[in-house]
Image: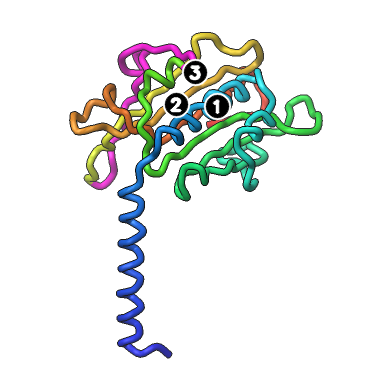
Amino acid sequence: MQTEAEKKAQRAAYKVEAQRAQAAYDNFRYTDAQREQTIEFIGAAMQVIRGEAEFDSLKQLLPVTGTGMGLRPNTSSRFDFDSDFLNKWTGIDVSTIPKRDGGAGFEPAWFQIDFRPPMNIPRERLEELLQLKVVHGWSPDGGNLQFEMAPLHGLPYFNGGSFLYSPLKQPQGDFDVEVRFTYLNGPDKDPWTATRLSDIQIRRQYLVSEPVKLR
């Protein structure tokens, strides 16, 4: 059994290690090369989700490091891509559903990057890359910016903006594509000028009546 002195020393060591890990995270900065490689992968993922490129084309850019349960209901599996070229905190994955024609294999339905820490990528660059419909204003009025939900228990409002897009040209098929960016605001608290991207999602929204729901 540990003595009180040993427990105290263990707690102190844990605190030092936690502070060291937090400092490493806070001081981390992406390089231009990392940013360009990430943007290339986002563009390739859009082609896959649109059905214009094979899923294996993504594995030519980044290896798959693991699989698991899909990130959303009714997805069959999740493919985790190697994000070590960025850091140990960021996650890159694609969720899939079984082929709806009953054949073997799967359909890629949901691509996501969870940036930790956020990466500086101007929205305009991603809007152009992914050929998105850009309308300034709130999403209920036809714009891209979504309303922020009220926080619970008196917490401060989320310091950022969630932007929802449709492509200028939807795929020719029985699904539409939806793109969502989540940005953290800068000092001016204006989501339209934010550059720190914390999350990107590109997903299929199926148009036919069948048991495939991605929300």
Residue tagged 2: 180
Element type where label 3 sits in the image:
loop
Element type where label 2 sits in the image:
strand
Is 59 magenta? The answer is no
The circle drawn on residue 203 is 1
Magenta part mainly helix, strand or loop?
A: loop
Q: Residues within 10 Å of mark 3 (few under 14, many from 20)?
A: many
Q: Give the range drawn in magenta.
A: 129-153
* Real-space Cα separation, disc 2 to disc 3, in angstroms: 11 Å
Q: Residues within 10 Å of mark 1 (few under 14, many from 20)?
A: many
Q: Where is residue 204 in the image (x, y as percent from the top left)?
A: 58, 24
Q: Residue furthest left?
A: 188
Indicate left or right for 133 with 173 as reference.
left
The circle drawn on residue 130 is 3
Is 141 magenta? The answer is yes
Residue sitting at 29 percent across and 27 percent down? 194
Circles 2 and 1, Cβ within 8 Å, touching? The answer is yes
The image quadrant of residue 163 is: top left
